[in-house]
Amino acid sequence: MKLTLGFSSCPNDTFIFDALVNNKIKHGFSFDIMIADVEELNRLALDGKPDITKMSYHAYARAASKYLVCESGSALGRGNGPLFVSKMKIYPDEVPFLKIAVPGEYTTAAFLLKYAFPTIKKPDVYLFSDIEDVVLSNETDAGVLIHEGRFTYRNKGLRLIRDLGEHWELFTKQAIPLGCIAVNRDLPEDIRRSFAAALKESILFAMANPESSHDYVKKHAQEQSEEITGKHIELFVNDYTVALGEDGRKAVNFFLNETKRLKVVESLPEKIFSD
């Protein structure tokens, strides 16, 4: 069966999908693959277009009526949240007056920024890979970094205002649900289950054979340093990626309920997870 599949170019995504899309494991699917920025994937998911896609958990809250969260594939953990940075020393009472760049309106990064600083002005949306540069050039006063930017910002002359993931963990005591792999609710249950099994096998293959995905990861990575891509994969691919489990599902449910409490969404479906 042929399915439309979207995921980002970031090393954690290409790492976990390599074995699946490059047929290093056996499965019964073929794919129309779209590799895109996560915010582009978020917007496509809001329209219910892909059969299966990576999306931010913030976007998932808005698209939950169309998709179910896969047990495997999530970027979820501790100590790996987005970073709020600037060239200048910024005091908390100055933040509401800043011009801030975020990597997408529907990213979890944008949600966590608002969670930490509820009185900020509406931020400006930029491609995630441009945010360091727009802050350095003074086009914006500050920016929220995701993906490889967390490993490079200090060397580029930026300083941390707030670790937004750390803020979330401190106040909620929960792991940080960044992004998920979601399957369209219109897909038959047997297809959803078969895909879930293949995705988990692909992740386990990648973890057992880390060199196998090297070329595929490098081909698509924003930052070509092998040290940085290695750190990226190590930080974002973890036990929760293999399977959310009870703790991971608890963190996801807490996050989604917070989006409802804060009126990001009016309601959520009763069934969230694919299996």
Image (cartoon, grey):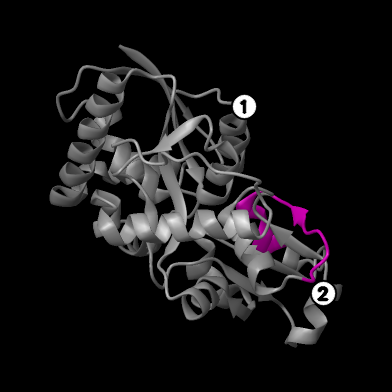
Q: Which residue is drawn at 24% across and 50% down?
A: 242
Residue 22 showing in the rendered view: no
Residue receiving disc 1: 47
Residue kind at label 2, given as amino acid type:
Pro
Q: Do the residues labelled 2 and 1 touch (CB within 8 Å)?
A: no
Is residue 129 shown in magenta?
yes
Q: Residue at x 40, y 67 (%)?
A: 175
Q: How far apart are marks 2 and 1 (CA)?
A: 32 Å
For the point 35% across and 13% down, the residue is 2
Percent x, y of residue 244: 29, 53
Residue bearing mark 2: 96
> Quarter holding the C terminus?
top left
> Looking at numbered disc 1 in the image, what kind of residue is underneath it?
Asp
* Horizontal side, residue 89 vs residue 246: left or right: right
Residue 41 lies, in percent from the top left, at 56, 36
Stretch of the chain drawn in magenta: 119-133
Q: In this view, does 103 lie to the left or right of 163?
A: right
Q: In this view, does 139 lie above or below 243?
A: below
The earlier-in-sequence mark between 2 and 1 is: 1
